[in-house]
Amino acid sequence: MSVLIKGGTVVTADLSFRADVYCEDGRIAAIGEDLAVPATAEVIDAAGQYVMPGGIDPHTHMQFPFMGTVASDDFYTGTAAALAGGTTSIIDFVIPKPGQRLMEAYEQWREWAEKAAADYTFHVAITWWDDSVREDMGTLVRDHGVNSFKHFMAYKNAIMADDETLVKSFRRSVELGAMPTVHAENGELVYQLQQEMLDKGITGPEAHPLSRPPLVEGEAANRAIQVARAMNVPIYLVHVSCKESLDAITRARTSGQRVYGEVLAGHLTIDDSVYRSKDFDFAAAHVMSPPFRPKAHQEALWHGLQGGNLQTTATDHCCFCTDQKAAGRDDFTKIPNGTAGVEDRLAILWDEGVNKGRLTPNEFVAVTSTNTAKLFNLYPRKGSISVGADADIVVWDPQGSRIISAATHHMNVDFNIFEGRTVTGIPSHTLSRGRIVWCNGELRAERGAGRYLHRPPFAPVFEAMAKQGALQEPQPVER
Ligand SMILES: NC(=O)NCCC(=O)O
Ligand SMILES: [Zn+2]
Ligand SMILES: [Zn+2]
């Protein structure tokens, strides 16, 4: 199978240039003009379009067993929908139950993911601690190409990591050269504020944001950053949703600390008015954590992205249908947390970002693909248009448009948080390792075609931090 993408403008995180791209055996084989290619090559006319690295979503939860139910997109339907939207790789999460061996959970998620239609890999969550966790972290890095470990600081009495677990896991991450990542919300504060809401008789979805205000996230973000500083380890904060946590990141980065932040397409474009809808199903459909915030936070998040204090965009794709969300009809704390977005991220970010002048096309590529590839050591195999890279490519039609709707989307969920938005700028073609899987509205996703991606530790950052650490090594006073 070989494909020639002809007449387009290649857009990478660094530059844009007119060139044809020839793909063969799943890789990019040649980039240039007047390429000599076999007559059998399939040709995509990309005139007037951009040829960009396929999107990488660093934050999804396909078929995640969570809050008494299971997310409705599985690894096939969710990755197929991703391909329809121009995202060609996902980083999902292995989330062991407290007390469950990490390796057992990892094997379970690997089995679930075998049906994926696009390439995938995993962050592994540290939801408890003992010597076996420490041992399994080593096995995962050494033998299974895991280079990032997730810590939920929220979800008390479930998967919450307390400070002791954070410190021990961050210290182990340094030894292994793995990136710690955090969901930064103070789980104790959330729990107490949830009880307060219920005691006041406020049981609807409107209580969700009231029980996890921005300060709850800002405190945890700052605490995680300080623990990382004390442990001399880089840190990546997922779904940064508010100014308070962005400010903590900005302060740390200004002091030279290696702190990285992710922002969701939803948090950039949706505000907390959704929770005050009188329609329970509509309000409950938007229950995710951290919650959507007052509008003022959106501009701060866009500034964070534009200013380089937020590096990646994601979706936290974790979808539950209306009947699943109804579990919390009488008690908002029982509404499964999560929303969908894996199919819409690129179009939303292009329409709100590039079309409104917040992002250049090159910056769009950086924040939807290349930065994630670099942070989690998938680059340049992923996140680049370069000879030898996987032929994960999206041919982007900047003039094309569509109306986002649950009625037409490919995600396996009956609600869309971007419902009714008209977006201009859509993928005309998506290639996954050289196979045309999305072609002018026709989805050709193949169950099981996705491959697990091994990610070695990102040595340069850890070597540099080890040198810094050595220079600051405390010394005993000889008396
Ligand atoms: N985000 C959310 O509400 N659900 C998925 C789990 C998580 O990322 O916290
Ligand atoms: Zn989270
Ligand atoms: Zn998540």
Image (cartoon, rainbow, N blue to C red):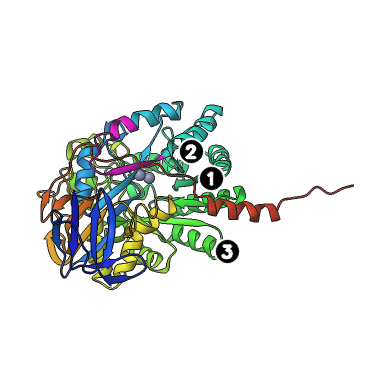
* Residue 177 circle label: 1
Q: Quick check: 331 left or right of 440?
A: right
Label 2–label 1 contact, CB within 8 A: yes
Q: Residue 141: which disc?
A: 2
Residue 298 in view (yes/no): yes
Q: What is the x, y in percent for residue 457?
A: 49, 45
Disc count in the image? Answer: 3
* Labels 3 and 2 touching (C-beta < 8 A): no
Is there any visible trace of residue 73 in the rendered image? Answer: no
| CA distance for labels 2 and 1 | 8 Å
> Does 109 appear above or below 14?
above
What residue range appears in magenta? 110-123
Estimate how packed mark 3 is, as few (under 14), some (14 to 19) or many (20 or more) residues with alpha carbons within 10 Å: few
- The residue where tag 3 is placed is 255
What kind of residue is marked 1? Gly
| Quadrant housing residue 426 | bottom left
Earlier residue among tags 2 and 1: 2
